[in-house]
Amino acid sequence: MRAATDEPVTMLQRLRTAGLRPTTARIGVLQVIHSAGSAGIGADEAFHQMLLRGTHVSTSTVYRIIHELQTLGVLLHDRSDRRHTVYRLRPFAPPPSADVRMACRRCERSATLPGAQLRNELELRAAEVGLRPLVAGLVLQVDCLGCDGATGHCQPN
């Protein structure tokens, strides 16, 4: 288990990896769920724990944040012994390389570009429709401007 001084860094990493802006409410929800450990915690109990910690948010905010974090894969949910839904942190995995490689489908010439924004946008759009892409490496197939469509030979500029 991490020391209390390391916890905010981990929570910030989790939020940034998910493409979310770290807010007081999001950090608070993650800290409360982290404190619950492997047993997990229900949304109502998370709300009460946040109030006890001095973080004043509405119940709907806690539910919205939990739903958002679950959809983005930060949280796991399960049923408790009393058939209540409980949430716990998914084990943290560092994000895959955010680079995007573009490769010509004819001559295979390629270029690597920083693609964190594109990757985040793809993941957010997928989450909106209930999908979670498992993208290890992102490669876009393109036609380079130097390729001759008829022969497939490349004439680099």
Image (tube, helix red, strand yellow):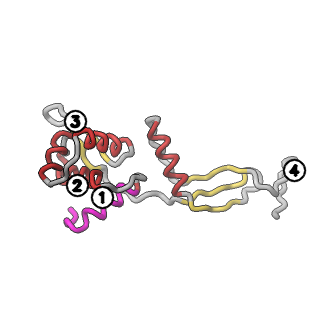
Label 2 neighbour load within 10 Å: few <14, some 14-19, many 20+? many
Q: Which of marks 3 and 1 is in front?
A: 1
Q: Which is more N-terminal, label 4 or label 3?
A: 3
Q: Which is more N-terminal, label 1 or label 3?
A: 1
Residue at mark 4 to residue at mark 2: CA–CA distance: 59 Å
Q: Is residue 3 magenta?
A: yes
Q: Nearer the viewer, mark 2 or mark 3?
A: 2
Q: Which residue is drawn at 12% across and 51% down?
A: 52
As displayed, is residue 69 above or below residue 98?
A: above
Location of mark 4 (residue): 151
Mark identifier at residue 31: 2
What amino acid is labelled 2 in the image? Gln
Q: Nearer the viewer, mark 4 or mark 1?
A: 1
Point out the stretch of residues depicted in magenta: 1-16
Identify the element where label 3 is drawn: strand
Q: Residue at x 52, y 46 (%)?
A: 122
Location of mark 1 (residue): 11
Q: Which is more N-terminal, label 1 or label 2?
A: 1
Query: Would you say 144 lies left or right of 72 here?
Result: right
Identify the element where label 2 is drawn: helix
Instruction: Locate residue 113, reporting x and y percent.
Output: 61, 61
Location of mark 3 (residue): 85
Residue at mark 4 to residue at mark 1: CA–CA distance: 53 Å
